[in-house]
Amino acid sequence: MNNRNFSRSVRTVFFLVLPLIGACSFAGQMAKSSVEGVTSHYSNDHFTLVATIPANFGFTSKAKYSPKDGEKCDVYSPGLGGNVTRQQQKSNTTEAKQVEQTVSTDIPLEYNIADCSMELTSVSYELSGRYGPGSLDRDMELAGGLSVADKVSITKESAPSVIEQRGICTWYFQISTSKIKKGEIEKILSCEATGPEWEMTHDRFKRRKPGGVIARGDISNKSVHVEFKLSPLEEPYYQNYWIKLPGGWKPCTGRWNSSREELCTSPPQFRTFKLNGRDCSVYPGCNE
């Protein structure tokens, strides 16, 4: 065999082996993932999250886990072509019903996979609801949650066995500028924390979401009760862009003649909008 034929043979063997090497690497990673799937588990140590949600609203809790201090929890990512730090999320979803619901779920405090130990770092609350019959007449709100820390300096006493949280959810309306709903009313859901008597500050900038920070040692075997109520009153999303009259809310137009409501002038100038396919001048009654 001459040198040229020998070189050609070597190249042929090399390119035939390359896919096999990739296949073996992929197969090895799949086998490793399968083994890790068998060995992964959540801890029995947990707290219980109890959520009360209004009729026609769904609720999702998302528990997030991160490696403990000192743990090396790298895993190969085929998409990135290198190692990344493991993260884990455990979600629980309750679909909306036409009645108020109270649901309960246990949130484990640890997650273990292979030689990696992870701990709970946060739990987020998500509410989703509909405000109309259309497929786009819905919104989802990140409605607060818990941050779990090793130490909480502001906590002087241990948490009670039942931790109570409250939130009032409000639909805020505006005139849409999106292509599919341009000129129509759309609504944005917002949930804010309240006190024990369901009181809430009138200053939007001082409001916060339900939840807070809790020490890791204070949450084991405890119950967190979060209750959401829907406000019967709707408000404009932009303050001072609508004026409330005896017949309802009227949107202003102003100096720019834009496709949405504008900051009200003195004297106010009003514009129309669409609601369920109708041309309207006042919300929610459409006509004065």
Image: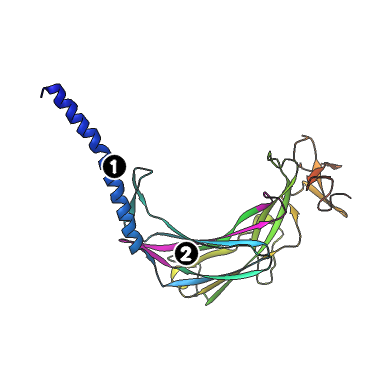
SS at circle 1? helix
Write the residue at 65% across / 72% down: 196
Q: In the displayed structure, does residue 185 sit left or right of residue 217? A: right
What amino acid type is highlighted by mark number 2? Val
Q: What scheme was used to colour the molecule?
A: rainbow
SS at circle 2? strand
Q: Are marks 2 and 1 in contact (CB under 8 Å)?
A: no
Q: Earlier in the sequence, mark 2 or mark 1?
A: 1
Magenta segment range? 109-138
The picture places residue 121, in percent across and down from the top left corner, at 45, 61
Q: Tell me which corner region of the image, top left, top right, bottom left or bottom right, holds residue 81.
A: top left
Most common SS among magenta residues: strand
Q: Nearer the viewer, mark 2 or mark 1?
A: 1
Q: Do we see residue 8 in this rendering?
A: yes
What amino acid type is highlighted by mark number 1? Gly
Q: Residue furthest bottom?
A: 161
Question: How many C-alpha atoms fall within 10 Å of the one at disc 2: few (<14), some, or many (≥20)?
Answer: many
**Mark 2 sits on what residue?**
148
Q: Quadrant of the N terminus?
A: top left
Q: Tell me which corner region of the image, top left, top right, bottom left or bottom right, holds residue 253.
A: top right
Eyeballing the image, is 261 above or below 162? above
Residues 37 and 127: in front is 37
**Mark 1 sits on what residue?**
22
Q: Residue furthest left?
A: 1
Marks 2/1: CA–CA distance:
41 Å
Q: Do we see residue 70 in this rendering?
A: no
Residues 76 and 255: in front is 76
Eyeballing the image, is 194 above or below 9? below
The picture places residue 116, in percent across and down from the top left corner, at 33, 60
The picture places residue 29, in percent across and down from the top left corner, at 31, 50
Write the residue at 47% across / 75% down: 221
